[in-house]
Amino acid sequence: MKILAVDTALGACSVAVLDDARVLAHRFVTMERGHAEALAPMVQEAMQASGIAFADLDRLAVTTGPGTFTGQRVGLAFMRGLRVALKTPLVGITTLQAMCAAAMAEAQTPYAAAIHDARREEAYLAVTSADAVPVAPEILRMQDVPDRIARAIPQGSAVALAGTGAERIAGRVPSARLTAIRQPDALWVAKLAMTAPEPAQAPHPLYLRAPDAKLPASA
């Protein structure tokens, strides 16, 4: 299966093209802003490097969130447009799911937790294993994260920690192994989407918190 995956939802912009387990092209750049300007050239460059045409793709994949409101929309809008143009299925993968998969592979643990610092002393959290999701993406107080992770996994089980909030809670989680994973990567988005069920509809953004900007009451 040939798949193109992208991520723009958090603090990086990445693109990956895979043919089953073989990585044909991979681009990853850490950035807080500028995803909209960077994505299209990065996709074009990766597709050229892969040696395959857009028409040869069997599947597309994109992160749905949680993330920044602008970042989530950039990737989703771009890939939803490709979905229509190519008539190719588009799979949505959460940012936290992608980070967990990368962390489990790096640390070789049965469980992983992705903790993204959502500011305001809050965190986006997900906990996964190879075949389950003990904690689906949610938002909670940063101080409550260690206990939430401990209650989600068997006592004594090793858990890999990923995300921008991982260092803050690492010392408070038994059997935790801190990894270098801080942002989602399209490479893992592609790997997860490869085995996901084919969706009937295009994915939608996953918002766990209302936007900071609000329309005036008179609007």
Image: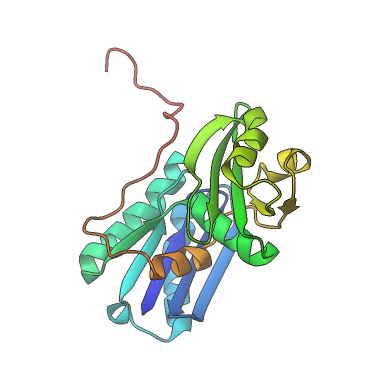
Q: Which residue is drawn at 60% across and 36% down?
A: 148
Q: In which quarter of the image is residue 160?
A: bottom right
Task: Left or right? Give the position of 55 relative to 15.
Answer: left
Q: Residue at x 51, y 80 (%)?
A: 23
Q: In x, y percent, where is residue 179?
A: 71, 56
Quarter location, residue 150? top right
Left or right for 175, reference 29: right
Question: What colouring does the structure picture have?
Answer: rainbow
Residue 117 shows in this picture: no
| Horizontal arrangement in the rendering, residue 193 relative to residue 204 (left or right) | right
Q: Is residue 194 above or below residue 127?
A: below
Residue 164: quadrant of the picture = top right
The mark total stands at: 0
Q: Quadrant of the C terminus?
A: top left
The x, y position of residue 126, in whole percent, is 53, 45
Q: Position of residue 190 (x, y in %)?
A: 45, 68
Does any portion of residue 162 appear in the rendered image?
yes
Q: Furthest-right residue in view?
A: 171
**69, above or below 38, in the image:** above
The residue that appears at 74% across and 44% down in the rendered structure is 174
From the viewer's side, name the closer residue of 72 and 177: 177
Residue at the front extreme, as displayed = 155
Q: In which quarter of the image is the N terminus?
A: bottom left
x and y, in percent, of residue 139 in the image: 51, 33
Looking at this view, name the residue that lies furthest to the top: 218
- Residue furthest toward the bottom? 51
User: Which residue corresponds to the image point at 50% horizontal and 54% vertical from the top-left?
Assistant: 97
